[in-house]
Image (tube, rainbow, N blue to C red):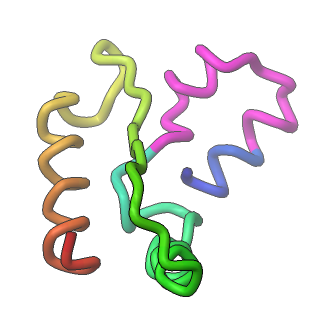
C-alpha cells in the first residue's frame, strides 16, 4: 500500500474503488508493507502454508498495465524475498 495515497483517500473519505483508482495499492516493495519482516515472522512460527498476495488495480486508471504490476511484484518476491 502506498501510505501517502492511503492517507489522501482517508482524508477525502473515499471508498474502496476510489482508493484503487487513486493508486493506494502498489507493487510489492514500493509500499508501506514490510514484507521482509512479515516473512521473518512467518519463519519464526514455522509457517508452512499458503499466502495470497494481490494488488487491486483499475486498468483504466493504473499508471502501468496490470500485467506489468504483477510482473514487478513477482520479481520482488523472487529477487528480494527468495520466494
Residue 28: x percent and y percent? 36, 58
Q: Is residue 60 magenta?
A: no
- Residue 81 in the image: above or below residue 83: below
- Residue 51 in the image: above or below residue 67: below
What type of secondary structure mainly makes up the magenta span?
A: helix
Residue 54: quarter of image: top left
Relative to 29, 3 lies left or right? right
- Residue 40 in the image: above or below residue 32: below
Query: Start and end of the magenta stretch?
Result: 8-25
Q: How many marks?
A: 0
Residue nearest the observer in this picture, 70 or 49: 49
Relative to 11, 49 lies left or right? left
Residue 22: x percent and y percent? 54, 30
Which quarter of the image is occupied by the C terminus?
bottom left
Residue 19: quarter of image: top right
Q: Residue at x 40, y 43 (%)?
A: 52
Relative to 33, 12 lies left or right? right
Q: Residue at x 67, y 20 (%)?
A: 16
Q: Residue at x 40, y 64 (%)?
A: 48
Residue 80: x percent and y percent? 24, 80
- Residue 14 in the image: above or below residue 51: above
Residue 68: x percent and y percent? 13, 40
Amino acid at each position: 500500500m502506498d501510505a501517502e495515497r492511503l492517507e489522501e483517500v482517508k482524508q477525502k473519505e473515499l471508498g474502496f474503488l476510489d482508493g484503487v483508482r487513486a493508486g493506494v495499492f502498489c507493487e510489492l516493495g514500493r509500499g508501506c508493507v514490510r514484507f521482509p519482516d512479515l516473512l521473518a515472522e512467518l519463519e519464526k512460527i514455522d509457517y508452512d502454508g499458503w499466502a495470497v498476495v494481490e494488488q487491486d488495480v483499475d486498468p483504466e486508471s493504473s499508471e502501468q498495465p496490470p500485467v506489468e504490476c504483477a510482473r514487478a511484484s513477482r520479481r520482488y518476491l523472487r529477487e528480494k524475498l527468495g520466494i
